[in-house]
Amino acid sequence: MKLLEIRNGIIRLCEKHDFFLRMLVKFVIAFVVFFTINNYIGYYDKISNLPAAIILACICSLLPRDAIMWCAMVVVLINMYELSLEVMIVTLLLFTLFIMLYYRFAPQDGILVVISSIMLKYKMGYLVPMGTGLLRNIFSVIAVSIGTLIFYFLEGVRNNAADLKNVMVANSEESSTKITVALDQIFGNRELAVVMIVMVVATIVVYVIRSRSIDNAWEIAIVAGAITQIIGYIIGYMIIGMLDKSVEVVIGCIVATILGFVLKFFFMNLDYSRTENVQFEDDSYYYYVKAVPKKTIQQQEKTVKHFGNTTNIGKELSEYNKKDNQ
């Protein structure tokens, strides 16, 4: 009961200060994004500094949340241009393709693209399928996939930055070599294939199970998602010879499981012991409805104790006031 009181208090606080909390969350996410870009691929010194990250984060906090994705793309393109024109062109083409997929399938998940990339950068990508599957829809796997591709592409560019920057573009052959190296960061990256497949499959598993009308669907989905990731990553890393990441996978999935149960506590805290099955019909259909109540705290009824005979207090006061006026 104490946990439910804390939960309700947090929810009421968030609802009361919703506007300012949204701005704060957008600022924090944007700052982490721009700070990470500056430290990871900050080739253009004029925008790769702390004041620039703070200013951009402040601007994004005042704009719709998808502005973070658009601003991040612009900053990335500027840094890629400073590194190499060819790399910038490849990046622009990839972003164009991603935008087309984004607007077609997941127009509300721009922030998820950014979060997926940042989570992978800080070794917390295991949380993405869990949170996405529990809170978003099936098409959100597109945003997760785009975020994964962007991260591994930029990581590959960063790892080959010295070669890409030092090669002087004297002819078309060297220019095409740069483009080939840039594209190879996606098409030749075996780890990218493993991570993307596992994240997509795990997200779908979590979403499909938690959306079923079965008892404890969210709990089953959380456990199934964690197991899917553990098995998928270990098999994938075994194939590509990266089993040294097994410990990281297990720890990451444990943290993801904890996150899943925290999300369940706040968003889908149900009392299955009081489930009701209702049936009714109209002229066209017969309906079977399963109603599962949320866990709530019953408000205590307040009682007021009266001492002495107080039933005629109002009448006596009224008569006293009349006599006093006379």
Image: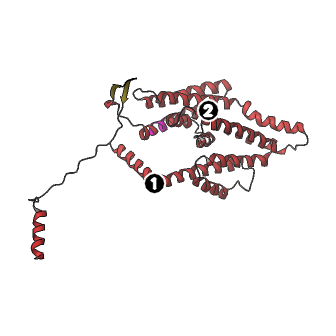
Q: Residue furthest bottom?
A: 326
Report if residue 251 is visible in the image.
Answer: no
User: Where residue 20 sits in the image (x, y, percent)?
Assistant: 50, 55
What is the quadrant of the C terminus in the image? bottom left
Quarter where residue 199 is shown: top right
Q: Seen in the image, is 169 located left or right of residue 256?
A: right
Q: Seen in the image, is 325 located left or right of residue 1?
A: left
Does the magenta portion include 258? yes
Q: Seen in the image, is 12 located left or right of residue 235?
A: left
Nearest to viewer (mark 2 / mark 1) = 1
At numbered mark 2, what does the secondary structure look like: helix, strand or loop?
A: helix
303 versus 222 height, above or below: below
Q: Which residue is mark 2?
A: 245
Which disc number belongs to residue 17? Answer: 1
Along the line of sight, which residue is nearer the eye, 323 or 119?
323
190 versus 40 height, above or below: above
Q: Are marks 2 and 1 in contact (CB under 8 Å)?
A: no
Identify the magenta region.
257-262
Q: Which residue corresponds to the image point at 82% horizontal and 38% vertical from the top-left?
A: 178
Which disc number belongs to residue 197? Answer: none
Does the magenta portion include 38? no
Q: Residue furthest front?
A: 283
Along the line of sight, which residue is nearer the eye, 255 or 321?
321
